[in-house]
Image (cartoon, rainbow, N blue to C red):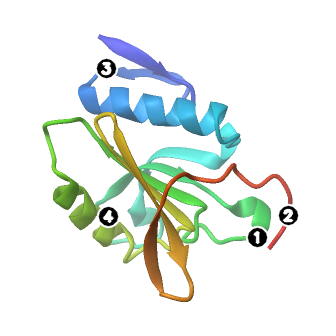
Amino acid sequence: MTCYDPIRQKSVASTPEEAVRQRVICFLLECLGVPPHLMEIEFSLSQIKKTSRDRVDVLVHDFRRGKEISNPWLLVECKAEGEYTWTDLEIQLNRYLKVLNPSYVMLGLGGEVRYFSFSKEKNSYIPISELPKYPKSKEK
């Protein structure tokens, strides 16, 4: 069984994790106004750090505001319920944060979602209740 991925513009295997990823993609497109051309699915961190074998589920670039590829607007990691724990997800996220410096992080585990924003004052990611809409202007 397959499902259509509007970002990759192809059919992909319909797995429990893919179902979570596709819900996230719809949320980003429809609720936050993320332009599809700024979204990458299964982004390989080897594009930034050659030795990395990790892939981020969804990466939303921040090129509109002049940010480098290593400074995306949003990093999303999602897992199907029952396969991972929040601790597993956070361990995986911490590996990604050694390579990327996103403004926001979204973690999805089944139907539950957690959001984080980078705090310059605390030099760390702090929990937030929701993500902002994707910025439309070239504000820096």
Q: Disc 2 designates what residue?
A: 138
In the structure shown, which secondary structural element does the residue marked by tag 4 occupy? helix
Q: Disc 4 designates what residue?
A: 93
Please tell me in which quadrant of the rendered image residue 108 appears. Answer: top left
3D distance between C-alphas at marks 3 and 2:
37 Å
In the structure shown, which secondary structural element does the residue marked by tag 3 occupy? loop
Looking at the image, tell me whether mark 4 or mark 1 is earlier in sequence order: 1
Q: Where is residue 137 shown, x and y percent of the image? A: 86, 58
Please tell me in which quadrant of the rendered image residue 16 appears. Answer: top left
* Residue occupying the point 44% across, 29% down: 22
**Picture layout, residue 130 above or below residue 30:** below
Q: Disc 3 designates what residue?
A: 14
**Picture layout, residue 115 above or below residue 24:** below
* Residue occupying the point 67% across, 61% down: 62
**Picture layout, residue 111 above or below residue 97:** above
3D distance between C-alphas at marks 2 and 1:
8 Å
**Picture layout, residue 100 above or below residue 25:** below
In the structure shown, which secondary structural element does the residue marked by tag 1 occupy? loop
3D distance between C-alphas at marks 2 and 4:
28 Å
3D distance between C-alphas at marks 3 and 4:
24 Å
Q: Amino acid at mark 4?
A: Leu
Q: Nearer the viewer, mark 3 or mark 2?
A: 2
Q: Nearer the viewer, mark 4 or mark 1?
A: 4
Q: Where is residue 64 shown, x and y percent of the image? A: 78, 60
* Residue occupying the point 45% across, 29% down: 23
Looking at the image, tell me whether mark 3 or mark 2 is earlier in sequence order: 3
Q: Disc 1 designates what residue?
A: 66
3D distance between C-alphas at marks 1 and 3:
35 Å
